Each structure stands twice: as structure tokens, then as C-alpha cells.
């Protein structure tokens, strides 16, 4: 049987806060990110940073290793290839030892200076404190509009209530992290998993900044596939929709059949009607193919889960070495 928590790490010197930073080809901005992160954490009792290299093809890993050599509060987890951001976050959670864990991207769109406020809310009794975007600088109207539409769609599909305007930037208590780590499904939509586990939750508003360096790795195609992961991972509404559309089409077909029979009995059966016949055939064929695709999406996910492959493989792991001061 597959190990429940592969590569799990619990040190004898557990830091108060662990910061998990997934990164893929972030050479341009990683140094700048760390320079901003360290002062933001300076007021905390003890902390560590877990950088996760998600199979980068540039010098991201080399920069992480250089930072780790100069700062013993830094750990580096390098995956064997690019597994995707959702899996990279999972690898970071598996290796984070803090009483609370913060997840943040390395592109500085989410300000590290907000972390002390997240920690303050955690200390007041909340298990999860997510950062909710008040504004989104540097993003096109299309990206903002589609993101807003996706969050609203998720609010009305299934039982999962996904917080609006919220990304992965958040703080989680140890019991939330342990709960999320128990969820080892292959198709991972982390924002949904974070919401699914529940526990007392609050949020902090902030203004999302434009990316400082480099370019976004999220094309519209990747965002579309991520949205599909979110929808198919947490609701069977598309399958129910297929049933409802099928019933509606069957009802319309029955009405049309009655109309054809009545018309034939009254005025006969002329040969005319080829265009309308082709329209109906193409419409029905399109609906059938579309919902075969929906069924295929769910079937493919079942197929991938039955393989029981590990979520990721590690090429290199460099632990942090900081000791808690007393």
C-alpha cells in the first residue's frame, strides 16, 4: 500500500511558521523575493522557508541552493520534473514542519509583508487565514472577468463554497495542513482542497500587485484546464447537466414527432425538409459528443486514480538547519 505521507518531515526543532514557496523558472525574481520575505518574517519567533523547485529549466534551483547556503532557515525541495504547481504545493506541505504554514508564490504579486497579519489572525484562534484580493493589478480585463466568473460558478455548483477572489496565498494551522496532506488524489485543485477541509476560517483583504520580474507561466489554456480540474474534482454537476439536457432534447424530439405526424395526416408527406432534418441531426450529434467528452473527463480521472502512482518524485532535498532560540 502506498505510504500516506511520503517524504513527511517532522523535526526536533519545529519552527513556529513555515513558508512554502513553489517556483517554476523564477530566476528573474527569486533573489528579490527572498530579500523581501526575510524582513517580513523578522518579527516572528522562529520560521523556515521551504522552496520547491518544480522541475525548472533555468537557474531557479541554483539560486535556491545559493540562498540555502547563506541562510540556514531555508530548505530546498527539488522535484524530479515539472509536476505542476498544485503538486509542488503538496510537496512543500509534506516538508513543512511549522505549527502554521503559509503558501505564497515567488512572483511577488502576493506581498510577503502581509504574512504577519495572517499570523496575527491565526494566533487569535483561526485555523485558516486566506488573503482575499481587493484589486488585481497588471491583469487584463479578460483574465479578471473569467476568474470572477469561475469563482461564481463554483459557488453555485455542488456543496463546496470556494472563496471568491482568493488564490493559494494563505496561512494554515498544523491540523489543517495534516488534513490536507491526507488527501492524496492525483487530480489536485488545491484551492478546492483547502476549502473542503473546513475548520474556522477568516480572510485578510489586500491589493494584488503586478508581477515584478519574469513572465506568468499561466496561459489561458492552462487556466482553462485548471478550471476543469476544479469543476470535475468537486462536483458531478456536469454529469447531471447531461441528464437534464438529454431529457430536454428528448421532450423536444417528442413534440416535433407529434407535429410531423399531425402534419402528415392533414396535408400529406412532401419530400421537402432536408435542411431542417440536417439541423436536427447535427444538433443531436453535437450534444451527444459533448457529453461523451464530459463522461470521458470523469472516466479519465477514475483511470488515473486507480494507478496509485506517487504524486511526485524528489531529485534533491536540502533541509533547513535553524535551531529554535530559547
Image (spheres, grey):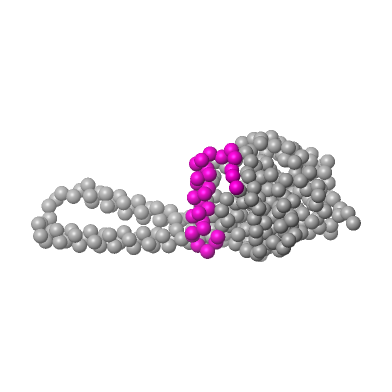
Left or right side of 113 for 242: left
Determine if residue 211 is in view. yes
Figure quadrant of residue 269: bottom left
- Which region shows up in magenta? 134-161
Left or right side of 298 for 1: right
- Return the x and y of residue 77 as percentages of the image width and height: 73, 48
- Return the x and y of residue 240 as percentages of the image width and height: 43, 62
Residue located farthest toward the left when viewing the structure as drawn: 267
- Return the x and y of residue 237 as percentages of the image width and height: 46, 60
Q: Nearer the viewer, residue 30 or 289?
A: 30
Tell me, yes or no, whether the highlighted magenta stretch contains residue 102. Answer: no
39 to 248, vertically: above or below: above
Residue drawn at 25 percent across, 49 percent down: 278
Tell me, yes or no, whether the highlighted magenta stretch contains residue 160. Answer: yes
Determine if residue 320 is in view. no
Residue drawn at 68 percent across, 51 percent down: 103
Q: Nearer the viewer, residue 50 or 155?
A: 155
- Return the x and y of residue 262 as percentages of the image width and height: 15, 61
Residue located farthest toward the right when viewing the structure as drawn: 326
Residue drawn at 74 percent across, 55 percent down: 119
Q: Nearer the viewer, residue 188 or 155?
A: 155
Residue drawn at 55 percent across, 60 percent down: 161
Question: Image quadrant for the C terminus?
Answer: bottom right
Question: Image quadrant for the N terminus?
Answer: bottom right
Amino acid at each position: 500500500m502506498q505510504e500516506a505521507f511520503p517524504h513527511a518531515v517532522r523535526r526536533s526543532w519545529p519552527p513556529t511558521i513555515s513558508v512554502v514557496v513553489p517556483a517554476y523558472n523564477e530566476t528573474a525574481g527569486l533573489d528579490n523575493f527572498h530579500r523581501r520575505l526575510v524582513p517580513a518574517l523578522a518579527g516572528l519567533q522562529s520560521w523556515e522557508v521551504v522552496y520547491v523547485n518544480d522541475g525548472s529549466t533555468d537557474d531557479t534551483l541554483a539560486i535556491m541552493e545559493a540562498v540555502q547556503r547563506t541562510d540556514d532557515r531555508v530548505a530546498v525541495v527539488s522535484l524530479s520534473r515539472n509536476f505542476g504547481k498544485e503538486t509542488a504545493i503538496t510537496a512543500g506541505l509534506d516538508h513543512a514542519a511549522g505549527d502554521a504554514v503559509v503558501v505564497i508564490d515567488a512572483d511577488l504579486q502576493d506581498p510577503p509583508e502581509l504574512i504577519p497579519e495572517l499570523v496575527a489572525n491565526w494566533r487569535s484562534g483561526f485555523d485558516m487565514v486566506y488573503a482575499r484580493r481587493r484589486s488585481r493589478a497588471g491583469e487584463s480585463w479578460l483574465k479578471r472577468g473569467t476568474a470572477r466568473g469561475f469563482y461564481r460558478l463554483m459557488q453555485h455548483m455542488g456543496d463546496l463554497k470556494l472563496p471568491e477572489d482568493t488564490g493559494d496565498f494563505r496561512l494554515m494551522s498544523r491540523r489543517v495542513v495534516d488534513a490536507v496532506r491526507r488527501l492524496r488524489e492525483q487530480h489536485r485543485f488545491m484551492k478546492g482542497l483547502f476549502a473542503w477541509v473546513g475548520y474556522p476560517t477568516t480572510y485578510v483583504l489586500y491589493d494584488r500587485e503586478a508581477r515584478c520580474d519574469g513572465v506568468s507561466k499561466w496561459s489561458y489554456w492552462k487556466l482553462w484546464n485548471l478550471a476543469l480540474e476544479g469543476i470535475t474534482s468537486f462536483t458531478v454537476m456536469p454529469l447531471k447537466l447531461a441528464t437534464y439536457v438529454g431529457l430536454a432534447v428528448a421532450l423536444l424530439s417528442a413534440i416535433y414527432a407529434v407535429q410531423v405526424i399531425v402534419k402528415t395526416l392533414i396535408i400529406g408527406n412532401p419530400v421537402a425538409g432536408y435542411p431542417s432534418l440536417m439541423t436536427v441531426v447535427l444538433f443531436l450529434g453535437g450534444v451527444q459528443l459533448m457529453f461523451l467528452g464530459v463522461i470521458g473527463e470523469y472516466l479519465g480521472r477514475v483511470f488515473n486514480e486507480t494507478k496509485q502512482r506517487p504524486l511526485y518524485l524528489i531529485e534533491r532535498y536540502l533541509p533547513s538547519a535553524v535551531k529554535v532560540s530559547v
